[in-house]
Amino acid sequence: MNSDQYILGISAYYHDSAAAIIKDGVIIAAAQEERFTRVKHDPRFPVNAINYCLEEAFIEPGDLSAVVFYDHPVLTYDRVMKNCAYAGADSFETFSTATKSILGIKLWVDKHVKQAIGTAGQLGKVIFAGHHMSHAASSFYTSPFEEAAIVSVDGVGEWSTTTIAHGKGRDIQLLQEINYPNSLGLLYSAFTYYCGFKVNSGEYKLMGLAPYGKPVYVKEIYDHLIDVKEDGSYRLNMDYFGFLSTHKTTNDKFHQLFGGEPRQPESAITKKEMDLAASIQQVTEEIFIKIARHAKKITGSNNLCLSGGVALNCVANGKLLKENIFEHIWIQPASGDAGGALGACYVARHLYYKEPRIAPNGKTDTQKGSYLGPGFTDHEIVAFLDRNKYVYTKYSEEEKNELLAKEIDKGKILGFFAGRMEFGPRSLGARSIIGDARNSTMQSKMNLKIKFRESFRPFAPAVLREDVNKYFDLDTDSPYMLIVAPVKEEIRKPVEAHADSDDMIPVINQIRSALPAITHVDYSARIQTVHQETNPKFYNLIHAFRKLTGCSVLVNTSFNVRGEPIVCSPKDAYLCFMRTDIDILVLENYVLLKEAQPKFEESENWQKKYELD
Amino acid sequence: MNRQLFLYHPTIGYKFIPNIKTRIQHENGGYLVRTNDWGFRSEIEFGKTKEAGKKRVLFFGDSFTAGDGVSNKYRFTDLLEQLIPGIEVFNFGLPGSGTDQQYLMYKEFGKDVECDLIVVTVLVENIRRIKSHYRYYFNSAGEKVVFQKPYFDFKNGEFELFNVPVESQPLKIEELPESEQGKVDTGGRFGMARSIVNALGLKELTQKVTKYQPVPEYNTADSPEWKVMKEILHRWSMDAQAKFLIIPLPLYQFTEETSDPKNYQARFGELKSQLNIEVFDPLPALKKYSAEERRNFRHKTDVHPTPEGHKAIAASIAAKISDMIR
């Protein structure tokens, strides 16, 4: 192939549709459809994300060498058909829905692409990359490694649920796989559902809830639900699960095992849910580590690449890191299905076109900090603010950071909008809500008055890379907030023991460290190391805060409210700013104070607009 | 998400935000828009001083000139650079604008630009816009709002500019003074009937059967709209620092011969005969294409020119442009 080989990757139809584009193997852009449509986890064909990718590359659709879909709908249909044949009459509902879905939409990917952009590129047809190959490619080809073991674990994609592969140079060789219905992702989702959270988005809450409980159900899980071998292979006991024949992940037998019906969403969380969360988290970590050990054994590699939805379980990632099975671990920050769009691009480039890989340097990944979404120029921001007569002040970068550092120190909360939007589920300082990690009331204020979400949910620290070891038992890069590590003993504070009870509030309100807003109940923290090279704007803000206070840690949470996709545009940011108790909005170098803004009125109740996750 | 494309301008009403790089979703799959440092849709930066040895042509017009519906490189202005060796074209097109705003655009941004030719591509429909004081728009909440626009008119025998500085904020039609409520450009004649006919898919048939005349403002030389148009173009020709050319761009009804163009052709012809302004009519050249080709000059539902339409316009005017800059 000649230079200027553009490849567009697409993931769609399940959850979190996305598009990505690469040029000659270099990532140009990637974004989730939800950010544009403002529908969380939007599964629809990503016309807006595709449009954005072509915009960023600034090319015509006819310039695309290839358009690649991350999955193979025919294989998925094959699985659904065989699933239904196995389950018999009970599965009619599943069969009917899935058939309509797959035959109605998924087999027509080619048509949808042509409808959206008028062409399937120079190839004239869409390439289908394969679900787990897309996941594997998304982590390996963006990693710093020339050679690595690749583990991908998610709910299900086509037939596979867990794969181990070996990547070397431009090739990926699939070594072993575990097939549906045996799925670690679906097992975790079963507990997510049973504990009253939404499947495919509430898994993160379950992980956050786990440290409040005790793993008292681990034996029940191993005895009844899953049979795990020493090599990490496993088999689910389908007598306890509903997803073969219904739309529910669990069934009556599962409910009986754990003493009753699932928790109703939004009802009070009890000790039972906390213990269940702790138990499934421990089981997941144990299996995850066994799989990793086995991957090490069969590949002999010192490097590990992780992807798939389960790789977003940053607690398990932290435990895996501590096991020292591999010398280096790289986790794709968009590990869920969205990242499949990026992986699909690389499948086409390296496995279809057999183009050589740009030699990795062994140290830094090629994900560009995952700042792969839209950015907005000063001209665009000013045009937006002036058109609406919003009140702002422009500062130099240095003046702005000095001002913001002072305001954060006073307890003010910022909506921070800088540079290109993140690709993946985490806010990494481009679309973030920022606060003082030392402030003892910050967690409850952010949860209840800004995010409008459950009070138990922890917040993540963003820390200057060079200072991470001052505060945390971690001395490695974690730029994508995918690793959990303990807060240093030196900054911990003793807490009173609380009797096991259903009431989490006294436990939540305990001050556990000098950084109470980001110290979870088990003294852990989900760490983002901030690097001058990938996000100088965020780095400089934290640096200014360190200069003022001596502390190089800030709270960083996603710039959205519960159920809302992370903000994308200045308009999204302004709306979120005005709807919540965020004190200051920062749009690049333009600073807006809440009290200076014109009266804000909305014709509809925005809180009804977003479905709770 | 569509990026905001325009910013407020106190004299013209609005203009493109500078240095935008975006792709606009469209029925043809989408098109690329880039604006330069001056805030015009262009792949090149504008400068006042002309490069030695080059001929420079400035184009002013509305969305047909700015290129709604196609990427920059497919516009007739950009194609002219390929057809005529040694020229550079500055496209000052502004979507939704009237000839009044285009004249103001020239005065604000074009009059000090060294050039060999100034071309005003008047989409013939612009005559309706110059009598409007407001244009409507749907805001992000889906509400129909209006933005004020500048306009010229005769007052006590004097030709005056009104609505400057332009109000920056959108207004609701019902909040306008009663005398102003009829001054909103709603995009064409017979608004309600047009909606019904369009919804029924009978637009082209109806226009053909009724011999629809989309721009009756040209019917007589003394219509108030034509008087204003004529005065704007006259003043512009007088102000021009280089040769001056008017190209009346036909609506598709004229290209596809469902409406009679003779009245607007007569009016623009009078500019030449009465005021000695150079006018070039591309319609005869466009009509030489087959009916099928002419239908493909516009999109399926969007009336703006397709790449084929732009190509045909460029081909039809290239010789005239070339002659005038030699």
Image: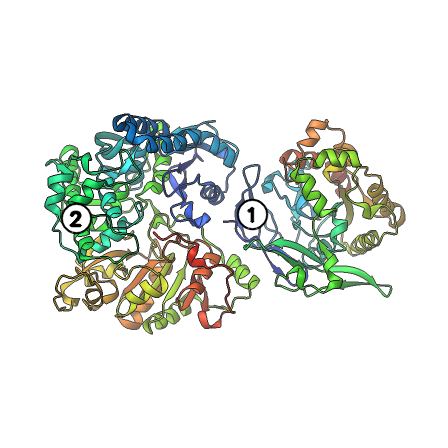
Q: Disc 1 is attached to a residue of which chain?
A: B
Asked whether residue A55 is in view, the answer is yes
Q: Which mark is nearer the camera, 1 or 2?
A: 2
State the mark number for residue B34. Answer: 1
Q: In which quadrant will I find the C terminus of chain B?
A: top right
Amino acid of disc 1: Arg
Query: Residue shown at 44%/50% (left/top)?
Result: A38
Question: Where on the picture, by quarter, is residue A449?
Answer: bottom left
Task: Evaluate whether residue B188 shows in this view.
Answer: no
Residue underneath mark 2:
A259
Residue in front for this viewpoint, A478 or A225: A225
Q: Is residue B135 left or right of residue A320?
A: right
Q: Residues within 10 Å of mark 1 (few under 14, many from 20)?
A: many
Viewer-proximal residue among A586 and B133: B133
Q: Position of residue B195 (x, y in %)?
A: 68, 43
Location of residue B114 with respect to B213 vertically, above or below:
below
**Labels 1, 2: one chain:** no
Give me the chain letter of mark 2.
A
Residue B72: x, y in percent? 59, 42
Which image quadrant is residue A526 in? Answer: bottom left
Q: Label 1: state its secondary structure.
A: strand
The residue lying toward the viewer, choosing from A219 and A548, is A219
Mark 2, Cα crowd under 10 Å, few <14 / some 14-19 / many 20+, is few
Name, please, the residue furthest toward the right. B274
Left or right: A121, with B197 as reference point: left
Above/below status of A177 relative to B43: above
**Residue at x 25%, y 35% (from the top left corner):** A161
Q: Position of residue A484 (x, y in %)?
A: 21, 54
Compute the Cα span from label 1 to label 2: 62 Å
**Direction from residue A124 to residue B294 in the image, left or right:** right
Render colour scheme: rainbow
Give x and y (percent) for residue B219. 85, 45
